[in-house]
Image: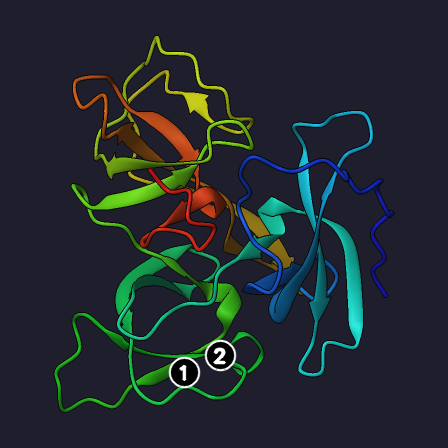
Amino acid sequence: EEQEEQEEEDTSIMEHSCFSKGDRVEYFSETHKQWFPGVIVAQTVHKKRHSREMYDVRIGAGGKQRRNAVEMTLLRRPLAQGEAVEVCTDVEAETWQAAVVSGAQSSCPAVTGYRVRFVEASDSEPTTVVPSARVKRLFAVGEKVYVYRGRKLGWKEAIVQDEEDEDDDDDDMPGIQRIKSTATVATVCSCKVGAAEIPSECGGRLPVVWATKPGRKPVLAPLHTISRTPPGDGRAA
């Protein structure tokens, strides 16, 4: 069983947070290489590196297991009905197809898989259940999103971009990278599933520009920090 090392909990009030206590999330198990349902039970901060925000999570159907000091890169919000996604249909070739979360979902789609309808499929074709580890959010160019920029800056509005270019602006959030060259809309990391590699949402990045600075060049924001709707801490801006 996985067991994360317990970090000291910061008893001071956090100005902002990516998740709030009680939030439903999905936790990516590096042992099992799949997502599991979870609930945020506490915020923790690295004892020495206070910019390293972590969370304690209860996982599983009954929430009987607890993982402490979970990195934000291993957490995501559950996919919503009607949400645009990409599905890895060929693991070895890393082929992705656009789809939409559609149809009746199970009580635990993180474990049993998400039911989706591929964009290229006709309305008469049945929906398909795909493993959660092969599904990641798909963001359209020009779409307005909210990006978590750390405890000090909180959530900020941004616009998804297509082409990447260098940005001279400094960002105060760990994980945000200035772009050095033109590339595709999103990059992904890979995780082992048996002998194969499956690209996972954890580790991917998306080029965005801040809504307050539309003329600036894009930066790469980590996928796990991006939300389509204003987060529940009431501090989105």
Question: Residue shown at 34%/43% (left/top)?
Answer: 146
Residue 188 can be seen, yes or no: no
Lower position in the chain sequence, tag 2 or tag 1? 2
Residue type at numbered disc 2: Gly
- Pick the residue in front: 196 or 104: 104
Give the quadrant of residue 121: bottom left
Question: Residue shown at 55%/63% (left/top)?
Answer: 23
Crowd band around label 2 with a 10 angstrom C-alpha radius: few (<14), some (14–19), many (20+): many
* Location of residue 134 in the rendering, given as x and y in whole percent from the top left corner: 47, 65
Give the answer, above or below, for where 18 lies relative to 159: below
Say left or right for 73 vs 163. right
Give the answer, above or below, for where 79 lies relative to 143: below
* Location of residue 168 in the rendering, given as x and y in whole percent from the top left corner: 34, 8
Give the quadrant of residue 148: top left
Helix, strand or loop under label 2: loop
Q: Which mark is residue 129?
A: 1
Helix, strand or loop under label 1: strand
Residue type at numbered disc 1: Val
* Location of residue 19 in the rendering, given as x and y in whole percent from the top left corner: 55, 52
Say left or right for 3 vs 102. right
Say left or right for 17 vs 48. left
Residue 160 can be seen, yes or no: yes
Question: Residue shown at 51%/26% (left/top)?
Answer: 173
Q: Quadrant of the N terminus?
A: bottom right
- Pick the residue in front: 16 or 58: 16
* Location of residue 77 in the rendering, given as x and y in whole percent from the top left corner: 48, 61
Residue beneath disc 2: 113
Give the quadrant of residue 208: top left
Crowd band around label 1 with a 10 angstrom C-alpha radius: few (<14), some (14–19), many (20+): some
Callout 2 touching callout 1 (CB < 8 Å): yes
